[in-house]
Image: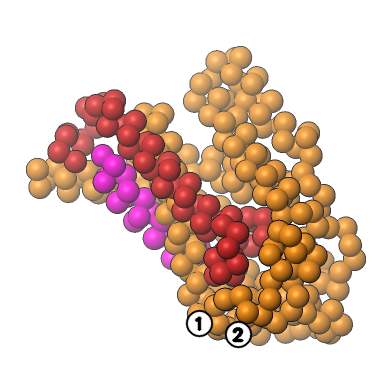
Amino acid sequence: MSTNTLALAGTRTNERLGAVLVAAFLGLGLVFMAGFAPAMALHNAAHDFRHTQNFPCH
Amino acid sequence: MIIRLVSAALVAGFLAAVVATGLQLALTSPLIIAAERYETQASLSAPTFVSLVVRVHGGHDHGAKDPAVSGGETASEWQPGPGLPRMVFTALATLVGGVGYALLLGAVLLAVGREPTPETGLRFAVAGFLAVALAPALGLPPELPGMEAAPLADRQFWWVMTATATAMGLYLIAIRRAPISIAGGLVLLVAPHLAGAPETSHAASALPAGYAAQFAARSLGIAFVFWAVIGLAYGWAWSLFGRRTVVHA
């Protein structure tokens, strides 16, 4: 956050790529955990959310 | 930048989860619980929409149809208690999913080099809704408990494939915009549906068709609101954290 955050144009490409990869990895991990994780405890905890958001369930 | 992105995603995911959890508890959870009652006692006549005090798959052999995938669900498996714990875990799962989607939205906005504003966020969120909610729902309509037909792995594979292909197709059409990429994008949009989704349930069920139809419509409606809030809030939070950084810098 030390760089200028006013506009995307002012940021370095490397930093942007890193942020994209980290965010995509974290995001996919969280979505997997909420929507796909096969562990029964996770499935049961997220059950109603999975049905409502149309993740294949059971 | 990653801190700004994650902060904005946390805010957007939280706000979307608050809204979506309220809608879920009011609109879809009662239908899920009613369906579970039919699943448990097929002969139950005219259930009333009682309060949310039923356990997830309470005491019935839900995994029997597909023990290889579901791991043979038994009463010993942990599950949230009925009532408040179940609602809390639904809210928690919605929060995790919301933050996850918001992070993905942020990653996409950054990758294509769009400055996140509420307008841009909303536009990309609509694409997200199309990719992970509407397109998969065309082949695999939102299901109530007890309506499942094809093996879970097949449905999950088709879901992921359709969501990915739709997202890429929308990117080619809306961002690339060259005639050749538009053609390729259209192919990607249509291909999963031509390939065909795993079969949906055709078995007769004691579950009233009205419940299933109502659930499908409400589920898509909630998914749209969920995404819309994620997109609007992400754009808002992005500028909020940007301003703060500049002020403190």
The chain that hosts pointer 1 is: B
- Residue A7 point in image, percent of width and height: 24, 32
- Residue B72 point in image, percent of width and height: 71, 68
Looking at marks 1 and 2 on the same chain, the residue that comes earlier in the sequence is marked by: 2
In the rendered image, what is the letter of the chain coloured orange?
A: B
The structure residue drawn at horizontal position 46% and vertical position 67%, both measured from the top left corner, is: B92
- Predominant SS along the magenta part: helix
The structure residue drawn at horizontal position 66% and vertical position 80%, both measured from the top left corner, is: B75
User: Mark 1 and mark 2, same subunit?
Assistant: yes
Q: Secondary structure at mark 2?
A: loop
Q: Which residue is mark 1?
A: B84
Q: Nearer the viewer, residue A14 or B48?
A: A14
Q: Do residues under tags 1 and 2 come within 8 Å of each other at their CB atoms?
A: no
Q: How is the image coloured?
A: by chain
- Residue A44 point in image, percent of width and height: 59, 70
In the image, which residues are magenta? B1-24
Q: Which residue is mark 2?
A: B53
Q: Nearer the viewer, residue B28 or B72?
A: B72
Q: Secondary structure at mark 1?
A: helix
Q: What's the amino acid at mark 1?
A: Leu
Q: Is residue A25 above or below residue B178?
A: below
The structure residue drawn at horizontal position 77% and vertical position 79%, both measured from the top left corner, is: B40
The chain that hosts pointer 2 is: B
10 Å crowding of disc 1: few (<14), some (14-19), many (20+): few
Can you say which quadrant of the picture contains the C terminus of chain B? top left
Q: Is residue B53 visible?
A: yes
Is B125 displayed left or right of B233 in the figure? Answer: right
- Residue B93 point in image, percent of width and height: 50, 64
Q: Is residue B218 visible?
A: no
Can you say which quadrant of the picture contains the N terminus of chain B? top left
Q: Is residue B112 above or below residue B91?
A: above
